[in-house]
Image: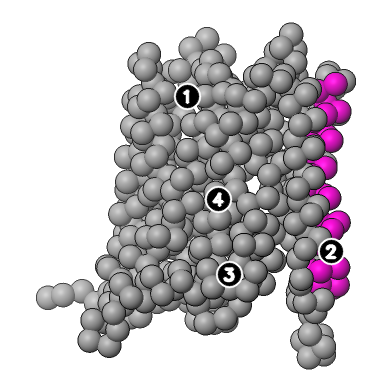
Amino acid sequence: MSIKKAEHRNPWTWVPTLYYAEGVPYALVMLVSVIMYKRMGVSNADIGFYSGLLYLPWVIKPLWSPIIDMFKKKRFWIVVMEFIVGLGLLGVSLSIPPSNFILYTIIFFFLMAFSSATHDIAADGFYMLGLDKHQQAFFTGIRSTFYRLAIITAQGVLVIIAGELEKSGNIPHAWSLVFIILTALFFLFFIYHKFILPYPASDKAVVNTETSNPIKNFFGTFAFFFKKDKIALIITFLLIYRLGEAQLITLVQPFLLDPRNVGGLGLTTIQVGFIYGTVGVIALSVGGIVGGILAARNGLKYWLWPMFIAINIPALVYIFLSFTLPTSFYTISSMVAIEQFCYGFGFTAYMLYMIYIVEGEFKTSHFAIATGFMALSMMLPRLFSGALQEFLGYKHFFVWVLFTMIPGFFIVRLLNIDPEFGKKSKKAEE
């Protein structure tokens, strides 16, 4: 006797955990790995290069996103990818003690990155299949909140735990234990979602060889994107707008951790976990919320220049910190809060511009392509930023980052954006 599988379940039982599970691997691969490698004595040049390479799965994610639609159910992809992420976490934990840990941990981080990027695609698609229109709107804020909580857990709580464990004097063992904890967490996600996720009737493979040619449709989607008006300017903007931030994000945590005799601030792992996992995430969220409210009031075009300037203010923050080397934890935390607020505010323009350029028949696929360029804009600068910092030193490196905003001035000036885009319509206001 077969058991009927539930097509619908209370969204509160699976939406929060699904997006929490989506946020943790990204934070581990992109953010926490930097702290781990720094604490284990890896050079800034190597940290920058390897962390840059780890962006690759998110860069090429659009290339295999149609496969998620064409083969198997999205529920299948979600559950399997969570299991593979768990295996990747276990692999990192077991790879840390050996002397050649860098090679093995990078391999397992790559496994996690590809699995996480695939999980992102499947989860976002499943969200739209498992909820009706009203529920999708209602749970938008919920999913974002739990994604943020995942970042806080990974970049804050887990880093603080690692810092406490480091007090034993065995840093590799401390980080190995942290990844064992994460392994257990993801196997729990795998088991929980295997039984709790609903089975929407619309969740099925969409290949239909009788009515369409999937290969032709796949390449046609990309062709339409690159036929957009002023596509060269669009791509240049996507690659240049975050040039300064892409270099900073790799080196700010090593700067906070490095001793003062080499130009760093000499903070502990616990202090960095608190600053970026709590103060930083709160400031980032507030900056994004403020940016969204203002853009909705006056439109993207009105706020584009202030937001572009804001996303480059963090370079000034770190120029100040590197030249003054303050000892006050309050001062350092305040500066990081300013940095993160400005990044959240400035990033709003980038996200809105991606939405602006993908209007049309292939909106979903073209947005995925745009996010691929977004990931590429972060990957390429990270490959050389660590080596550049070691050559210039922290002070001059942060000054260099400030000057790299100059090309952005010319690109932003060339953009032609509808003044009404982003504004709330009169009908919606009424």
How many C-alpha atoms fall within 10 Å of the one at disc 2: few (<14), some, or many (≥20)? some
Mark 4–mark 2 Cα distance, whole angstroms, equals 23 Å
Reading the image, the residue beneath label 2 is 303
Residue named by callout 1: 175
Mark 2 in CB contact with mark 3 (< 8 angstroms): no
Q: Nearer the viewer, mark 3 or mark 4?
A: 4
Q: Nearer the viewer, mark 4 or mark 1?
A: 4
Q: Amino acid at mark 1?
A: Trp
Residue at x 35% of width, y 65% of height? 68
Labels in figure, total:
4
Q: Main secondary structure of the magenta part?
A: helix
Of residues 87 and 356, the one nearer the viewer is 356
Q: Give residue 224's position: percent from left, percent from top.
A: 49, 75
Within 10 angstroms of label 4, few (less than 14), some, or many (20 or more) residues?
many
Element carrying mark 4: helix
SS at mark 1 in the image: helix
Q: Residues within 10 Å of mark 3 (few under 14, many from 20)?
A: some
Region of the chain picked out in magenta, as a range: 297-323
Residue 130 percent location from the top left of the image: 43, 74
Give the side of residue 415 with respect to residue 157, left or right: right
Which quarter of the rendering shows the N terminus? bottom left
Evaluate if marks 3 and 4 touch, with contact meaning CB atoms under 8 Å apart. Answer: no
* Real-space Cα separation, disc 3 to disc 4, in angstroms: 26 Å
Q: Which residue is mark 3?
A: 139
User: Which residue is label 4 attached to?
Assistant: 375
